Image (cartoon, helix red, strand yellow):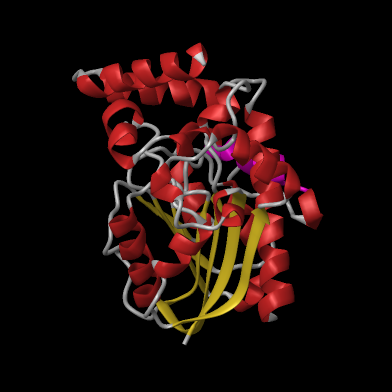
Amino acid sequence: MIRFLAKVAVQRLLGAVPFGPAFYQRQQTRRILSPSDVLINIDSKHAEALSHLRLMREAAGVAPSDVAAHLEIGSGWLPVIPLTFRRHGMGRQILTDVTALLCRDKVPDVARRLTGIDGAAPHPHIGGDGTVDDLLAAEDMVYHAPAHAPFPVPSGSVDLVTCTQVLIYPPPPVVRAMHEEAARCLRPGGLYLATIQLDDLYAIADPRLSRFNFLRYSSAAWKRWFDNRFTPLNRLRPSQHARLLDGLPFERLVWRVDGGGPAELAELARIRPHGEFAHLPPEDLAATNLTFLLRRV
């Protein structure tokens, strides 16, 4: 468990010093965009984008060309998902982030990687004298960061809101505010699509950890010893995510929970979740991913 504890210690130390956040972001960007990882990141995000499009088509009968305006909450370092959507015929896209993570110098590389995929034509601004802003404008995209709710989007003006692997981080009141903002921005009949990884992200860096390690701790202990600005995991389970949507004007089209089977339940039993989680069913605690698609009513 030393790797896990060491990473937490480093994150908490960097979060407490003036230069820490900028240094941490540079290190993360360097890792994500390293030659060994950047193509993997692009290809995995491209696969997620195609999965989003399939879900919209199969569950809602909506094709990319039916979407005149799309709001992406949490765009991250590389705009792979909106660029993929654009190559499938989607219209205007508004990209947002709470922190300015977009690696602007890598946007042409992403566009090149996606060029030719699914029959896409080469982009006219790639390889020329155009700036990244020219490329984004030519793709009918605008990027806002830092951006917090309310987003710079008129009420009822978008057809699609997506939030890909973002809702694992914010505290519950912020998650609720993001849902409310999605409802505000969507026109009636518009779609809200989100994917949420539910297991402990520290287990990715430290394979000795259980995917449910973070459930061993009380809220007070987690906040005191582990929570930090770089990995602020909210530890919400599917039923808790469902309650955060209560009362909002959405119709549920898809609510898919992965995990919670025999293997995950056995792993959960080995780590012995804290008593604070005793009111939740074991299948809820042992979930590993949540995907939902909602329609604005």
Q: Is residue 33 visible?
A: no
Which residue is drawn at the image coordinates 23% and 18% (left, top)? Answer: 19
Q: What is the chief secondary structure element of the magenta stretch?
A: helix
Q: Residue at x 68, y 65 (%)?
A: 53
Q: Give the answer, above or below, for where 42 lies relative to 191.
A: above
- Residue 174 to residue 221: above or below: below
256 or 287: nearer the eye? 287
Relative to 100, 242 lies left or right = right
Residue 41: which quarter of the image?
top right
Farthest residue to the right: give it: 119
State which region is magenta: 107-116
Q: Nearer the viewer, residue 29 or 173?
A: 173
Estimate the x, y position of residue 131 in percent, counting from the top left: 46, 40
Q: Is residue 186 visible?
A: yes
Q: Residue at x 36, y 15 (%)?
A: 10
Q: Is residue 276 magenta?
A: no
**Which picture quadrant has residue 56?**
bottom right
Task: Give the x, y percent position of residue 121.
Answer: 74, 54
Judge from the rendering whether residue 18 lies leftward or rightward of residue 173; answer left or right.
left
User: Picture coordinates of residue 201 (x, y %)?
Assistant: 52, 34
**Residue ID at (30%, 52%):** 147
Image location of residue 86, percent across then percent down? 62, 60
